[in-house]
Image: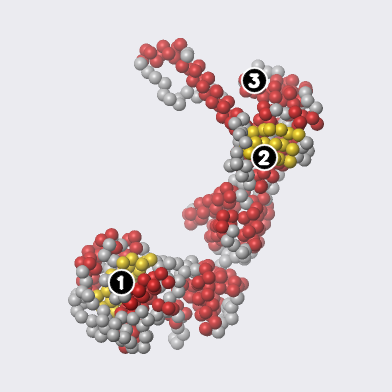
Amino acid sequence: MSYEVLARKYRPTNFDEVVGQDHIIQALSNSILQDRMHQAFIFSGTRGVGKTTLGRILAKCLNCLSADSPVSTPCNSCSNCEEIKLGRSLDFYEQDAASQRGIDAMKGLLQTVPQSPSNGRFKVYLLDEAHMLTTESFNALLKNLEEPPKHVVFILATTNPEKLPKTVQSRCLQLNLKTVGGVVLSSHLKMILESEKINFDDESIELISDAASGSVRDALTLLDQAIAHGSGVLEAENVKKLLGTIDDSHLISMLHSVIDGSGQSAFDDLAKIEELSPEYEIILKSIISVLHKTSLEKVLQNTTDENIKGLAIKIDDEFCQLLYEIAVNSYSKFNVHPNPKEALEICILRMLAFNPLHKLDAQPNKQNTEKKNLKTDHPLNITQENFSKKINTNAISDDKKQETKVIETIINTDPSKSAAVISNDQWIQIFNSLSLSPFARNYFGYLEFESFNNLALVLIGSDEDNKIPENVHMEFKSACEEYFKKTISIKVKNGSSSKSPIHAKEKQESDRQSKAEKDVLSDPSIQKFLDKFDGNIKDGSIKPIN
């Protein structure tokens, strides 16, 4: 076959053609120009970023016949450069350490080390996938790495440098190659397509660049596939079908539904995504990617995508991280789930279930509604007859009796005026009766009541307490308006909040704990028991009765 794949056709032949590894090129070029060439190198990095290519270019630089000494730019036309390129140079040994990893192969290689170069200045040994060598092979290599002949250079290329023995690493100069992505890889792909005179659109390039995950070789392989799939033309829709990717607009819409707590809308969007026939694993990976971009946008404001910006404005930091954790956790267990579709659906259901605003569309049935109403009777809606029934019992605790006094005060007051005269104790009782998410209860529970006049509720808190997300603020405002049956405004002032609802609850629990400990320690029978058996009560073991 005469066709040469793009990954081989456009393989760099000198340092200037290498993509995205400027830091490595600078180090190697300076070493050559200053005649400070190291005896052994470790080129580490993910697949397809140029480890083997850099090794071959370095070998050509050291043995190029265009000058009397090593050069930083090989001529690629002399006999040494041509032989290294074709893989038949007697001074360049490239060995696959994955298939020839044993001690016998290493012995055969090391027997050639003392011999002088045939045509060049240096003998260069490139061990690809060096981490696959056996322990015996590494041990045999150590002495040669530490004190090789002056005409020998070793290059160990590996994707897992941590698997190389420390004794090997300490004898080598390690150069870590970066992943290549973003604008650098996209520009490289465009250059190749323009050189090949192939029509393309920018979205296709972005899709291929993202799918390559930082590997230039993977990007060129995908580019070959996309060109064949599109009959010599790159179009976004064809590339999406090839890669199995989906339109982010459907994912964005689904995440908006999740944030709003709309379960029906979320699954309607999922159904639209399923019509595109992508892999469910890819859908979940795309969700993770969108949430990742949203998280970065909230902190860095670094995206030009209006969809991502819209999500970042709508969702608060904590809920965004919670959705991300749910998605990643689901992905980690995806392969062990018997049904991929169910795994994805469960992930979305978890996102809806842990929505802090509790805005799920699912309507409770009549029985649940009645139970909920029984549990959340508004104090102002309690009739005097019902109130009498509630407090006419001998089984009311001290705490409950205190609460009924507060409720009775509200009942005996004109509801239209009650908002203007409530005290801090009454506010704590009202706050505890509000239907709030854990997020809102935690934010506003640390704020102390100051006043409630002219339809404005004024609360006090420290600077940290005042940093309340907008959606949590709106939830709290909505709950208060539902309680007071009128439109109100919420204002938060800076100041001390030592009498907030949460502080009051903590003090109440502390008092109960102290009373329980005092009652137990002062009980004569318990003291007699302890004295008799020379015992003591373990700290923290005394608990108040609920």
Residue receiving disc 2 = 492
Question: Does residue 382 show up?
Answer: yes
- Mark 2: amino acid: Val
- Mark 3: amino acid: Ile
Tag shown at residue 155: 1
Above or below 466: residue 107? below
Give the side of residue 471 with respect to residue 59, left or right.
right
The mark that comes first in sequence, 2 or 3, is 3
Q: Are marks 2 and 3 in contact (CB under 8 Å)?
A: no
Give the percent coordinates (x, y) of residue 511: 55, 23
Residue at image coords 67%, 50%: 260
Image quarter of the N terminus: bottom left
Residue receiving disc 3 = 396
Residue at image coords 77%, 23%: 412
Question: Does residue 271 show up?
Answer: no
Q: CA distance from mark 2 to mark 1?
A: 65 Å
- Mark 1: amino acid: Ile
Give the side of residue 263 with respect to residue 245, left or right.
right
Give the percent coordinates (x, y) of residue 409: 74, 23
